[in-house]
């Protein structure tokens, strides 16, 4: 029982004004705006909604909470009938953003704070100097005045809040008759046609030299400013009805131009009729709904908003659409729903004292937000009428903000922790890696994606073969451009496009390459050359070919269309193609067959090892010459800031499969003590086992180091639990402790019902492995699948653009475009990037 006496000088509660801990309380802005408000534990500074706060009280015994509530009221009309003039609202004392769903000119806000004592729910309004001890008052004041943790992160983010340029209001524009065409631009001083900037004073089109947008130039725009002093320029290709990217040479930073529409109109550009396209501006009246931006987002079609469980949108935090799209697809899968949302009480009860530091808790919270329906409710009839009267079309004003989820899963990652656009496929693999490292039960939900790939390598001269297996989660299909069925149209379009650019005329209607899916599948199954192949049969380099087949078929098949490639400038680019993806897919013919009669295996002979003369360089260069580690992949990783030797190991242990696969290895092993140590190649017979260990497979025969076991036992845990945790985390002490906190003691706190369910699941699953029970767990079955979702990308590269997700639910297609969730009328299945198939039961 907690009472006012508990708030005295001898209180055991952690009342502190430590701002380093205060960041925890701002868990969810929506909670503070919601009907129940937000409850902040005054001991841990963790924030809870009413539905979870009482569970926290029962679990921890903490009984003092700060209750925060924001009230929203419509402004009182003035004498003239309109709203009263806008003024600074002194009743807002919390550093939280105002909901963008409500027009701040028509509504006013008031924050309310109370101290609540449980279990009697005794409330003390704040401020209350008379009743509360000084220490408690100081702690409450510190909480209420603390800066939002997300606002603290903003100065370090890629996109800072822009300020209006001091030149915008008084900008002089020359009346020189310059008119800018909608396309076909070229730098006035060189031949560059990308990264072009329009000077808003004289209309000169010049190339830039900045790299904050992912591209470069020869710096002619800067030279022009030094010669003329004309301060503002707008980037061509970024002009939309919502604004444009403007740079101030004088202020040396990106700025806002409040008069941008007027300044563009001076050169004949009507920004209200423009949109972003691959080659810049494009008049909307030319050929509507042809670009992928329009087709994928189903522009021009009236879409019906969807509400309820499973139809909750996610706020775009600034280029976080890749995360939104992937998580919508993930939580449409029943195995992930059961693992996280179905086990929500269990996860919450066994999570660490600080659930913000537990991956499973973050997943459960996000899944609950997406699937509960609490954040996807249709507007009331009065709200709907008001929105129609104001001609507002964004009727879906609810949804969830995944700020804390993104902050947690991207912590320490050089790319996902930034505000830059990312590759959805890379994020999917990053998420799967985290799921693997944080098992939620005896059966990991990521098992549904895992499959074995059989790779058959053949020496072309000796005709001998070697069979190996590896684990994968995505089927990557190449784009067979040579198989396009409309080649004549493509050639004609390319000629017209070049002529239009040369004549500075509008571009012709886009013609997109049409690729048969069967051609892509054929390209996947065909042999590929192995560069610098070393044949153990010949004891020398020879020509080799490799083919890949499925050694097992996963429960859910993820197919990635390899649309992205690299241009001559090494900037990622995308192939704009249309592929007739099937609703029903049968890949049974790609089943691996193993060593065939008459085939002879390559002998297990170790390649020669080059030992340098200088002993100082022995450890740094002790690797197999014949493997010829892909130095281009090594350099790509090193340029990201990782140690060179760690990059070499990553490329080696992932079999020269490219920088993307090696990058995932780095993320999984960067906390290991020998992460940056030089690569040491074992004997040939040890390569396979070493590689498996490097990829995260823990040998069950090898006991964890006794000193690590002793450290965990000294903390009060049982020996068998310590060994189990170390094995599950590849002998990483920090992760083992996290694992223990996120899992119940199997001897004391195991739920019999859940254990029975796990045993049934394991019994029903067809579990295979490479080396008995120690190998990866595989759910094999027939190779027949049905499409249930796809993620589409709009833009020219992974460094820019936008992602949306289409999912088939309750017999119809639904589009998830950040906060907007609607019934899809024309799902663009031919323009997808990542496709999700589920197995058809036999």
Image (spheres, rainbow, N blue to C red):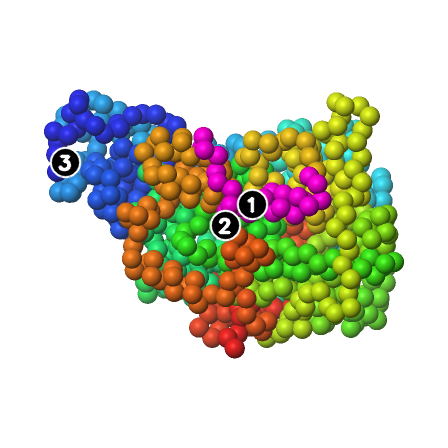
Q: Position of residue 131 (x, y in %)?
A: 14, 28
Numbered disc in front, either 3 or 1: 1
For the point 40% across and 57% down, the residue is 339
Marker disc for residue 730: none
How many neighbours does mark 2 have within 10 angstroms: few (below 14), some (14-19), or many (20 or more)?
some
Q: Secondary structure at mark 1?
A: loop
Q: Position of residue 560 (x, y in %)?
A: 64, 60
Query: Camera-side residue: 330 or 86?
Result: 330
Residue 717 visible in the shown view = yes
Residue assigned mark 1: 696
Q: Do the numbered discs 1 and 2 sit on residues whose CB atoms are within 8 Å?
A: yes
Residue assigned mark 3: 2
Q: Which residues are magenta?
A: 682-708
Q: Secondary structure at mark 3?
A: loop
For the point 55% across and 66% down, the residue is 780
Residue 531 visible in the shown view = no
Mark 1 and mark 2: Cα distance apart in space: 10 Å
Q: Secondary structure at mark 2?
A: helix
**Mark nearer the N terminus (3 vs 1):** 3
| Rendered image quadrant of residue 550 | bottom right
Figure disc tally: 3
Left or right placement of residue 821 versus residue 590 in this view = left
Residue assigned mark 2: 436
Q: Is residue 641 magenta?
A: no
For the point 84% across and 66% down, the residue is 491
Left or right placement of residue 722 versus residue 518 in this view = left
Mark 2 and mark 3: Cα distance apart in space: 41 Å
Q: Is residue 701 magenta?
A: yes
């Amino acid at each position: 029982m907690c009472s006012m006496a508990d708030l005295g000088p001898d209180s055991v509660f952690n009342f502190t004004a430590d701002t380093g801990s205060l960041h925890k309380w701002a868990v969810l802005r929506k909670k503070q705006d919601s009907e129940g408000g937000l409850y902040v534990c005054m001991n841990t500074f963790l924030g809870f909604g009413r539905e979870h706060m009482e569970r926290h009280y029962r679990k921890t015994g903490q009984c003092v909470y700060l209750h925060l509530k924001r009230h929203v009221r419509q402004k009182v009309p003035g004498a003239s009938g309109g709203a009263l003039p806008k003024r600074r609202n002194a009743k807002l004392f919390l550093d939280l953003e105002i909901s963008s769903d409500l027009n701040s000119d028509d509504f006013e806000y008031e924050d309310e704070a109370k101290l609540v004592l449980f279990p009697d729910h005794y409330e003390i309004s704040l401020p209350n100097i008379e009743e509360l001890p000084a220490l408690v008052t100081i702690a409450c004041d510190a909480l209420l005045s603390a800066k939002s943790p997300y606002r603290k992160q903003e100065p370090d983010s890629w996109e800072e809040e822009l300020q209006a340029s001091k030149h915008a209001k008084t900008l002089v524009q020359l009346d020189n008759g310059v008119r800018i065409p909608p396309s076909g631009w070229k730098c006035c001083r060189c031949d560059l046609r990308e990264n072009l900037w329009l000077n808003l004073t004289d209309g000169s089109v010049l190339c830039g030299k900045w790299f904050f947008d992912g591209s470069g130039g020869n710096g002619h725009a800067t030279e022009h400013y030094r010669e003329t002093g004309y301060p503002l320029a707008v980037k061509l290709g970024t002009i939309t009805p919502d604004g444009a990217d403007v740079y101030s040479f004088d202020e040396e930073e990106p700025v806002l131009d409040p008069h941008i529409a007027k300044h563009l109109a001076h050169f004949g550009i009507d920004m209200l009729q423009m949109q972003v396209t691959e080659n810049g501006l494009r008049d909307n009246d030319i050929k509507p709904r042809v670009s992928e931006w329009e087709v994928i987002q189903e522009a021009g079609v009236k879409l019906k908003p969807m509400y309820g469980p499973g139809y909750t949108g996610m706020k775009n935090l600034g280029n976080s659409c890749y995360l939104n799209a992937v998580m919508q697809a993930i939580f449409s899968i029943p195995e992930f729903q059961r693992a996280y949302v179905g086990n929500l009480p269990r996860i919450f009860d066994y999570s660490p004292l600080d659930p913000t530091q537990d991956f499973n808790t973050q997943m459960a919270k996000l899944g609950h937000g997406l699937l509960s329906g609490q954040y996807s409710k249709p507007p009331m009839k009065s709200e709907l009428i008001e929105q129609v009267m104001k001609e507002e079309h964004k009727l879906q004003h609810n949804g969830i903000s995944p700020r804390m989820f993104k902050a947690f899963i991207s912590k320490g990652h050089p790319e996902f922790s930034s505000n830059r656009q990312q590759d959805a496929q890379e994020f999917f693999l990053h998420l799967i890696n985290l799921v693997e490292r944080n098992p939620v039960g005896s059966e990991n939900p990521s098992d549904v994606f895992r499959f074995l790939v059989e790779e058959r390598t053949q020496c072309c001269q000796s005709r001998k073969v070697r069979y190996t297996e590896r684990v994968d989660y995505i089927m990557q299909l190449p784009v067979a451009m040579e198989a396009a069925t409309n080649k004549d149209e493509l050639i004609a379009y390319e000629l017209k496009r070049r002529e239009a650019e040369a004549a500075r005329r509008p571009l012709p209607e886009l013609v997109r390459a049409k690729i048969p899916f069967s051609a892509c599948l054929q390209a996947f199954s065909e042999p590929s050359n192995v560069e610098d192949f070393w044949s153990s049969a010949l004891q020398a380099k020879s020509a080799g070919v490799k083919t890949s087949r499925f050694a097992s078929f996963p429960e859910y098949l993820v197919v990635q269309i390899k649309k992205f490639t690299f241009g001559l400038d090494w900037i990622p680019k995308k192939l704009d193609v249309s592929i007739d993806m099937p609703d029903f897919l049968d890949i049974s013919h790609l089943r691996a067959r193993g060593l065939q009669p008459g085939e002879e295996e390559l002998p297990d002979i170790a390649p020669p090892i080059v030992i340098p003369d200088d002993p100082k360089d022995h450890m740094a260069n002790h690797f197999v010459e014949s493997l010829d580690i892909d130095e281009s992949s090594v350099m790509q990783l090193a340029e990201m800031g990782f140690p060179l030797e760690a990059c070499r190991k990553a490329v080696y242990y992932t079999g020269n499969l490219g920088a993307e696969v090696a990058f995932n290895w780095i993320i999984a092993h960067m906390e290991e003590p020998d992460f940056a140590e030089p690569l040491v190649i074992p004997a040939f017979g040890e390569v396979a086992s070493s590689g498996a260990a490097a990829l995260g497979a823990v040998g069950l025969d090898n006991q964890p180091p006794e000193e690590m076991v002793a450290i965990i036992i000294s903390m009060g845990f049982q020996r068998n639990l310590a060994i189990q945790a170390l094995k599950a985390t590849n002998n990483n002490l920090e992760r083992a402790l996290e694992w223990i906190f996120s899992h119940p003691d199997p001897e004391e706190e195991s739920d019999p019902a859940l254990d029975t369910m796990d045993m049934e699941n394991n019994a029903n699953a067809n579990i295979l492995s490479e080396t008995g029970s120690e190998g990866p767990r595989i759910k094999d079955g027939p190779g027949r699948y049905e499409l249930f979702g796809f993620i589409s990308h709009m833009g020219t590269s992974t460094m820019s653009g936008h992602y949306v997700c289409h999912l088939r639910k309750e017999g119809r297609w639904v589009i998830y475009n950040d906060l907007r969730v609607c019934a899809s009328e024309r799902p663009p299945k031919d323009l997808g990037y990542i496709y999700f198939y589920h197995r058809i039961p036999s």
